[in-house]
Image (cartoon, rainbow, N blue to C red):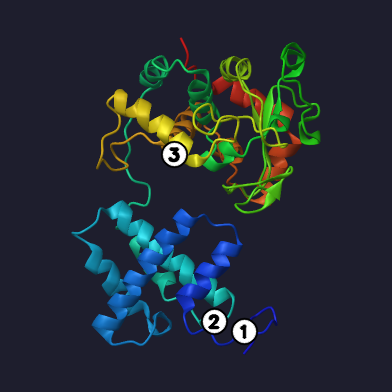
Amino acid sequence: MATESGTDTPEDVTDPIEYFLDDQRYHGKSDRTLEAYERVLRQFEAFVRERFDADAVGAAERRECMAWIHSLRGEFESSTIASYASYLNRFYDYMTRVGVFDANPMALVMEEMSESIDTNPTRRDLSVGEMRSFLGSIDHPLERAVIVTLLKTGMRVGELCNLDLRDLHLESVQAELDCEWSPRVGLERRPSSLFVSSEPARGTAVNGEERTASNKRKRDTVVPVDAELQRALLEWLAIRPDAISPARPLFLDTRDSWGERIEPSDVRYIVEKHARDYGWYRTGGGTQENVTPHYFRHFFTTHLRDRTGDRGIVQYLRGDVAGDVIDTYTHNWGDRVRETYLENIYAITE
C-alpha cells in the first residue's frame, strides 16, 4: 500500500501509539509533551478495548471516539476535554498522513465539538494596571527581565530560553556594555529588536550548543524592543555572569547552575514563585485561576490585539501565521510591524 505521495506505507506497525510517539520524538517534541500524548492515547486505547472489544486504536471509528469524549464529561473541565480530543485528533491525522491508517475518525468529531467545547478556556482577566503592580514587586534583574520579555513579546517559554546574545540588537548601547556581541545577520538594519528563530529543537545543536527546549514558530520572527524591555534587559546584562556555553545564551542561571542557560523549569519556578506571593497562584488551581508563563502570552495577545485591531500583526509577532502572510509583514517590518507595535504596546513599569 502507498501513501498519496507515492512512498511506501510503514510496515509491521504493531503498536501505532508507540510508532506515533517515536516519530514525534524525532520531530523534537519534549518528554513532557510525549508523556501527555501517551497518557491520553493509552487511556483511549483501554477504553476502546474494554467498551467495544476492538483489538487496537486502528479499528476505532467515529462512534467510538464520540463515546470516549462523552465518558470524560463530568470528570474533567471542558478545556481539558478539548485538549484530550486534540491529542487524539493529531494522532489519527498524523497516522493517516503517513499511511498507517486509512482515515481519521476524529475529523468530524472535532467539527461537532467546536460548538460545545471551549478550546480557549477563560483565564484571569488582569488589567495592565494590575500587571504593572505585579511587576513592581519583582526586584531581581534576571527574574524581572524574564517576565518583562514574556509580557512584551508574547513568546513561549522555550523560545525565551533559546535566545542567545546574537539574537538581541540594542544599537548604540551595546558598545557601553562589558559583554559586547555582534547581532546575527537577520537583525541588520533592524535596531532595538529580538530575533526569535524557528530553528531550535530539543536535542539538536544550534549555535554550537545542544538545546533542551524547542521553538514552535512556523517562521523566524523579528520582535521590536521598546524602551521598557530595553531597560529591563540592560539591568540584567549589567550583572549577567560569564556563560559556560559558547553559544552565549541571553538568560543564564544565577543559582545552582551558575552560568548555564536557563531552562523552562527555571522560568516556571520564577513565575510561580512571584505569582504565588501575589495571590495569583495556588496549588491545585487550574488555568482559569493560576498565572503561569503561558498566561503572559495570552495577556500579550489579548491586550495588543485589542489596542491595534490588527490580528495579522499580532499573529506575526506570536509566530503563528502562514508563509504568505508572514512574508507581507516581514517585507514591511519597519513600516508596519515596528511602528504599530511601538504605538500600541502597553506600559508595564512605573
Residue for point 52% across, 83% down: 13
- Please provide percent x and percent y for residue 146: 52, 27
Q: Amino acid at mark 3?
A: His
Of the two numbered discs 1 and 2 on the same chain, state the one appearing first in sequence.
Answer: 1
Furthest residue toward left: 74
- Please provide percent x and percent y for residue 233: 60, 20
Q: Amino acid at mark 2?
A: Val
The residue beneath circle 2 is 100
Of the two numbered discs 3 and 2 on the same chain, state the one appearing first in sequence.
Answer: 2
Q: Secondary structure at mark 2?
A: loop
The residue beneath circle 1 is 9
Residue for point 81% across, 34% down: 185
Residue 63 figure quarter: bottom left
Packing grade of label 1 (10 A; few <14, some 14-19, many >=20) is: some
- Residue 334's place in the image compared with 331, above or below, is above
- Residue 14's place in the image compared with 208, above or below, is below
- Residue 42's place in the image compared with 307, above or below, is below
Drawn side of residue 311 relative to residue 181, left or right: left
Packing grade of label 3 (10 A; few <14, some 14-19, many >=20) is: some
Drawn side of residue 75 relative to residue 10, left or right: left
Query: Decide: marks 1, 3 in contact (CB < 8 A)?
Result: no
Q: Quadrant of the N terminus?
A: bottom right
Q: Between 198 and 246, which is closer to the camera in this rendering?
A: 246
- Give the distance between the C-alpha atoms of the residues marked 1 and 3, in whole angstroms: 38 Å
Query: Decide: marks 3, 2 in contact (CB < 8 A)?
Result: no
- Please provide percent x and percent y for residue 346: 50, 20
The residue beneath circle 3 is 294
Q: Secondary structure at mark 1?
A: loop
Query: Decide: marks 1, 2 in contact (CB < 8 A)?
Result: yes
